[in-house]
Image (cartoon, helix red, strand yellow):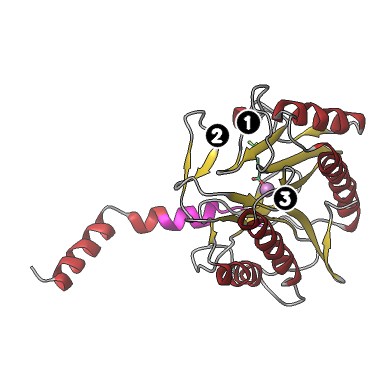
Amino acid sequence: MNRESMMMKFRRQLRRNGRGRIKARQEQERPAPIHKSPREIQIMREAGRIVARVHQAFREAIGPGISTWDLDELAAGIIHSHNAKSSFLGYRGYPANICTSINEELVHGIPNQARVLQEGDIISIDVGVFHRGFVGDSGWTYPVGEIDPAAERLLQVTEASLTAGIEAIRAGGCVLDISSAVQKSVEPSGFHVVREYTGHGVGRSMHEGPQVLNYVSDDTDGRVALSPGLVIAIEPMVQMGTWRTETLKDKWTVISEDHSLSAHFEHTVAVTNRGPEILTLL
Ligand code: MF3
Ligand code: CO
């Protein structure tokens, strides 16, 4: 059989076993964006500010000798002092307040008393809170003491891609503008944009529609309009050697498949009629 008839047979089989229907249903189940009122955005601004306070504390505390467990306790103290709670703790059984991912670990690393930061490490910390019913979500990759120039460049490229994504938000635009801006900003570096994890709408739940990819694809929410009231977490994840990832035996920690360094920067951003507003800042 030549390739063409093989393809026709394959397509007939696909029609018969109904894969088209499954696809259509998945598309239906993709959650629609939930727009927020100005009052709701005000609450999300407060939630975002609590998350920003936690990151400010990390910037001061991070250094050789501190454990990821200490960082979790530091975060919990600040979150609880604002009467907020972690949106990660208990999420699908997640056992900690924050995620701490070191070096080749990309996201979802679990804080641990025995995991102590060393000079030259990079650590990605993800923080999410519930405050008055709404979520703030932000992640950042920090250097531990002096890091080597290649690691420094990875952090610069990834942070710059988050900025590029945010700046791509314009009246009349759509989610794909963000995805494209992030991808274009990373690619000249030779580093790799992770594909298996994405940004997302955020509100009363941590994950709402639309999905915000960090690369261009048509099988996504890319055509969703960036209209006022939309609140999204933009979160480029970039790895030095490959875009592929794998998950460790703890079922949470995501690492680069080739164990190259990984970085993650995330802000919760509201689309307003004055343009994008970063909510997870002081
Ligand atoms: N902040 C992550 C995100 O943006 C979620 C952390 S996963 C958790 O998707 F399990 F730790 F909550
Ligand atoms: Co997020």
Say above or below: 81 vs 207.
above
Three-letter amino acid code of the residue under disc 2: Trp
**Is residue 27 in the magenta section?**
yes
Q: Nearer the viewer, residue 96 or 207?
A: 96
Residue sticking out furthest to the left: 1
Q: Are marks 3 and 1 in contact (CB under 8 Å)?
A: no
First in sequence, mark 3 or 1: give its number.
1
Residue 118 location (% of width, % of height) = 68, 35
Label of residue 86 in the image? none
Residue receiving disc 2: 252
* Cβ at disc 2 under 8 Å from ligand 1: yes
Horizontal relation, residue 18 to residue 272: left or right: left
In x, y percent, where is residue 100?
67, 37
Q: Earlier in the sequence, mark 2 or mark 1?
A: 1
| Alpha carbon distance from label 2 to label 1 | 7 Å
Give the quarter of the image for residue 215: bottom right
Residue with the mark numbered 3: 202
Mark 3 Cβ and ligand 2 under 8 Å apart: yes
Q: Which residues are magenta?
A: 23-32
Image vertical order of residue 155 relative to residue 90, above or below: below
What is the secondary structure assignment of the residue under circle 3?
Answer: loop
How many badges with numbers are in the image? 3
Ranked by sequence position, the earlier of labels 2 and 3 is 3
Which residue corresponds to mark 1? 110
**Measured Cα–Cα span from mark 2 to mark 3:** 21 Å
Residue that appears at 69% across and 34% down: 117
The overriding secondary structure of the stretch rendered in magenta is helix
Discs 2/3, front: 2
